[in-house]
Amino acid sequence: MTRPYALLTLLFLVLSAPFARAADDGWRLEKDEDGIQVYTRAVQGQKIREIRGTVRVQARLSAVAAVLTDVPATPQLSDAIGEAQVLQRQSASRYQVYQLLKMPWPLDNRDIVSQREIRQDAQTLAVTIADAATPEAIPPKAGIVRIQKSRQQWSLTPQADGSVLAEMRAMTDPAGPIPASVINSMSVGAPFKSLQKLRTLAQQPKYRDARLEFIKEPAR
């Protein structure tokens, strides 16, 4: 995979999630390696296939959530992200995120403003981290294409053995003349790499020992 196409895939598949309705079946396993599974499926009314990736992380629930919510460090999960920052924080689990996305020449860089909501199920303790694009939140910047349609969802489910099953789902409108066939053809390697990075980062002391006020850890 060439670097430009890898960056495109990281941009369009790792940072976004389904905004079109689809059934819970029809998944096709594309890659099953190193404890990571990546699936794709067609979505009615969309040219771009939906992506789903899963990995089991041997870490505390807060550690995995800490990696995904460390906004300034988001470039560690994706080479396509040049900058990430919190614009406005309403609470520890609700805030606005800005990300600048690097694109290969001759394409213009992209950016995205998202409203992030973090919730934890009171019964299962599963954590959902969901981003929804709010493109009008701040004025557009010259020379940068503002992504209009984007959602991201990570689901973190505690397991009986103390690990966490992390799942990401991804699909977006690329906001430009980039063929869906190009995006689809590169739709496996980039999410696979990001899931590997998530698993590795959760073991670093910075995240491994994290305590998040909005996360309740499972009893052991």
Image (cartoon, helix red, strand yellow):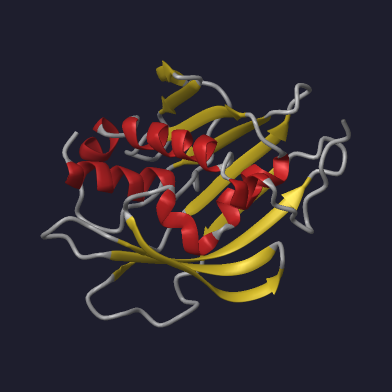
Q: Quadrant of the C terminus?
A: top right
26 sits left or right of 109 in the view: right
Task: State how many labels appear.
Answer: 0
Q: Can you say whether 88 is above or below 84 in the image?
A: below
Residue 147 place in picture, x, y as percent: 37, 63
Residue 2 place in picture, x, y as percent: 16, 38
Q: Can you say whether 218 is above or below 28 in the image?
A: below
Q: Quadrant of the N terminus?
A: top left
Image point (70%, 34%), residue name? 157
Image point (57%, 49%), residue name? 67
Q: Can you say whether 152 is above or below 141 in the image?
A: above
Q: Residue furthest front?
A: 205
- In front here: 178 or 197? 197
Residue 123 place in picture, x, y as percent: 87, 38
- In front here: 8 or 49? 8
127 sits left or right of 175 in the view: right
Q: Residue furthest left?
A: 106
58 sits left or right of 38 in the view: right
Residue 186 place in picture, x, y as percent: 27, 34
- Can residue 141 be seen from the camera position used here? yes
Q: Can you say whether 213 is above or below 43 in the image?
A: below
Image point (40%, 39%), residue name? 45
- Can residue 99 be seen from the camera position used here? no
146 sits left or right of 161 in the view: left
Snapshot quadrant of residue 139: bottom left
